[in-house]
Image (cartoon, grey):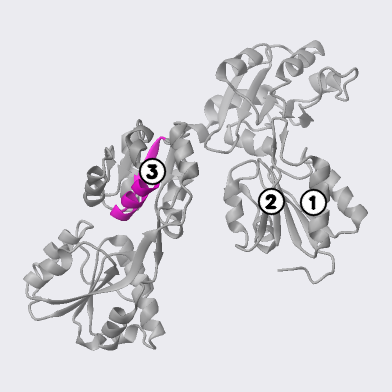
Amino acid sequence: MHSNNETGKVFLVGAGPGDPGLITVKGADCIARADVVVYDYLASPTLLAHANPDAEMIYVGKKGGDHTLPQDGINALIVEKAKQGNVVARLKGGDPFIFGRGGEEAEVLIAAGIPFEVVPGVTAAIGASAYAGIPLTHRDYTSDVAFVTGHEDPTKAESSVNWKALATGIGTLVFFMGVKNLPAIAANLVANGRSADTPAAVIRWGTTPKQKTVTATLGTIVEETRRAGIKAPAIIIVGGVVNLRKTMQWFEKRPLMGRRIVVTRAREQASGLVQRLTEYGAECIQCPTIQVGPPPDWAGLDRAIETIGQYSWIVFTSVNGVDYFFRRLFENGLDVRALGHIKTAAIGPATADRLRTWGLKSDIIPESYRAESVVEAFSATPVKGSRILLPRAMEARSVLPVELTRMGAMVDEVTAYETRQAENSAADLIARLTERTIDMVTFTSSSTVKNFHRLLPPDRVDRLMKGVSVASIGPITSQTARDLGFSVTIEADTYTVPGLIQAILNHQA
């Protein structure tokens, strides 16, 4: 990915105000292209998933006076990395040119002769106000808006802010980084002609599941903000448009707003669950406890594929079983035409849907999504003397092969993939559980339960899980959880990810 130039190139990328979905297409592309990603405190860590696995990640966050690297150091760093021939993505919260010091960094790059591009981002003023239900302009209220730094030292002899013009000449005011100076901001506006009854709002962690909004008037906003415990990072909005929040607020009304939920599913399979929970307002903490990979030995599956013509049925018990079977089928020089005479059964709609992507429709989909239901579905289908192939995970439950054999079928159970303990540091998880900053843990299989349990210190499991809800995808997973000492709070009626999400929503209602 190195630049063809002797000197590299720097992209000053606006990461948006917090919601990783607000990154621009070009911004995400720049992160993906980068050899080095230099990122801020306010840039969502989720955005780093766009980066190349080999890219160098450098955190230079600044919060509350605690600077990992001062601005001069950041400037020197991006110049140094670019001069080494790297493509550098300088990832900045919000927009680089709106109180993001992007202009200063651009000047340094110009002086060093380093090519650069600026990739605009959604600024906190626009993102946080929209997510709080406050339009910054409205034809019935105002046609002008001003963005103002709220970080100015209130003790300095002369302010660079024209308070008189702001107080009387602009309809909507948005102050960045101003919570600490909120008393001075409110006092200056009132002293320069703005009515103390003017609506005002303070929005903390805008566009994220931690968003919290306080509304009041200029005369009362300081006390209301203090009472609510609002601290940085936050923006302040002053103007009549704040009143529109009473009917327009939408983000903070979502049913799982602010709930902190651990997702233990394998990372490559967790996106659907994470996306849906996030859409409902949850803060998802990804802690994949399992990794799905090929089996240690392909011999069993290869033998089955070599003699595929002898099978009457193939039973798929998971999406992974489908994918690994077909990949191996293709690697052995065959395709779906080799299965033309074979009937298929699938546990669950997701497995059946994945089977369709490979060109096959399932002949049997049981009403409920576990092995016992497959057996029940086969009870109406003569299988005596039939040979059935069962490609699935290592250490899977024995119900299917035992019961199908009892019905007179000849079952070849072969390993198509395995689930392993994910390479995952438990430190962050244990720290969050210790600090009581986790509300719920979700389990989508018995493997996720067992591996999650292994992450916790044996002598602290009960204490760490105290007050944490456990949500299970179905009875088999729930029983595994109970056997390991977890108290299951929520169990899905339909044993699918959508069913699990619905059960969580029903519990919160």
Amino acid residing under circle 2: Ile
- How far is disc 2 from disc 3 in space, using C-alphas? 29 Å
Secondary structure, mark 3, is loop
Residue 410 percent location from the top left of the image: 13, 78
Q: Which residue is mark 2?
A: 58
- Residue 63 vs residue 492: left or right? right
Between discs 2 and 3, the one toward the N terminus: 2
Place residue 465 in its image quadrant.
top left
Q: Is residue 452 magenta?
A: yes
**Regarding mark 1 in the picture, which secondary structure is present there?**
helix
Q: Which residues lie in the magenta part? A: 439-455
Please determine whether, in this image, residue 360 is positioned above or below residue 334.
above
Residue 284 in sight here:
no
Q: Residue at x 87, y 23 (%)?
A: 162
Q: CA distance from mark 2 to mark 1?
A: 10 Å
Label drawn at residue 456: 3
Q: Which residue is mark 1?
A: 77
